[in-house]
Image (cartoon, rainbow, N blue to C red):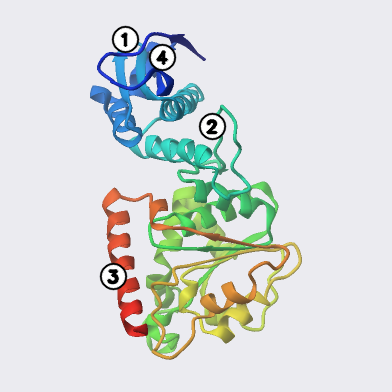
Amino acid sequence: MNGQELVSSSPRHPRTPSDTNHFVLTFENNRFASELFGQFDQNLKLLEERLSIDARARGNSVVITGDVVTTNQARRTLDYLYEKLQKGGSVERSDVEGAIRMAVAADDQLSLPTMERKAKLTMAQVSTRKKTIIARTPTQDAYIRALERSELVFGVGPAGTGKTYLAVAHAAQLLERGAVEKIILSRPAVEAGERLGFLPGDMKEKVDPYLRPLYDALYDMIPADKVDRAITAGVIEIAPLAFMRGRTLANAAIILDEAQNTTSMQMKMFLTRLGENARMIVTGDPSQIDLPRGVKSGLVEALQLLNGVEGISIVRFKDTDVVRHPLVGRIVRAYDSTYASEDVSRQD
């Protein structure tokens, strides 16, 4: 795939010989190398910024200088992205960010059973005929693998981490494979107090505003005409949580989104709907509870009660897993820091 030539340490980096690594990576395909480096070498500049290395393009080669750990992280990142290009993919800024995160995490020895400490970078992915989603953070990697192996998965954490999007993508993948016969997507319509009868329109028009994010994810993974036909045929069902009561959901991929806004009884009701050959995914953000004051979140309670139960995986996302605009992660950190300070002051 690429060549490597070891050269002497650069005088522009006054590191000691023991901690300096300096080498050249050469990529055979000039067009792929150009895409890999990015317009005006923007992807190499991102590597420099994130890993504190020096990366200089020379034709279809790149000279990398830095300490041993970070230069090897850069090598794994570039090798992975080049292979992605060879397979017909593209390399955007978000892909570079994700590859860097995974390369760094592999060396940090994170407590994730799915991290493979190999020279070659590997990332879990979800694929449908329309789109392939590749993990962009170590937690996304763990989440995708948990979805493959566990019948009930909780994905919890801040907005922008991809927990709902990946859940819907996984459900679409299962449907295409024939592993399930239908997809059921649900959210608690807490903004309407679940009194949907008072809202204008038919049932679809009543619940659509609360379920729009789920529709958006579906249309991203499955052609729009197929989604519409599947909804009409009942193969894809999108309904508020109240409509799950009294049912046994078998041969289905079932997703409960915004689960932090369920009550304890609603959560128990939902979890006990799990039927034969069904997969259930529960997503939510415990820091964004909209329930009336004094009402305990069913999600928070379930995370406490079900921790360690065989067959259940709980994956917790952090602000560092935010894959939207980098500013979103900083906003989440600022809010979390403020709320944590307020909690401490109340205890004092």
Q: Earlier in the sequence, mark 4 or mark 3?
A: 4
Closer mark to the observer between disc 1 and disc 3: 3
Q: Is residue 195 above or below residue 156?
A: below
Q: Position of residue 221 (x, y in %)?
A: 49, 49
Amino acid at circle 1:
Gly
Distance from Cα at disc 4 to Cα at disc 3: 44 Å
- Circle 1 residues within 10 Å: few <14, some 14–19, many ≥20: few
Q: Position of residue 250 (x, y in %)?
A: 71, 67
**Of circles 2 and 4, which is in front?**
4
**Disc 4 residue type?**
Phe
Helix, strand or loop for disc 2 = loop
User: Which label was assigned to residue 121?
Assistant: 2
Q: Disc 2 or 3, which lies upstream in sequence?
A: 2
53 w.r.t. 10: above or below: below
* Residue 197 appears left or right of 39: right
In the rendered image, which residue does mark 4 sit on?
23
- Label 4 sits on a secondary structure element that is strand
Name the residue carrying label 3: 338
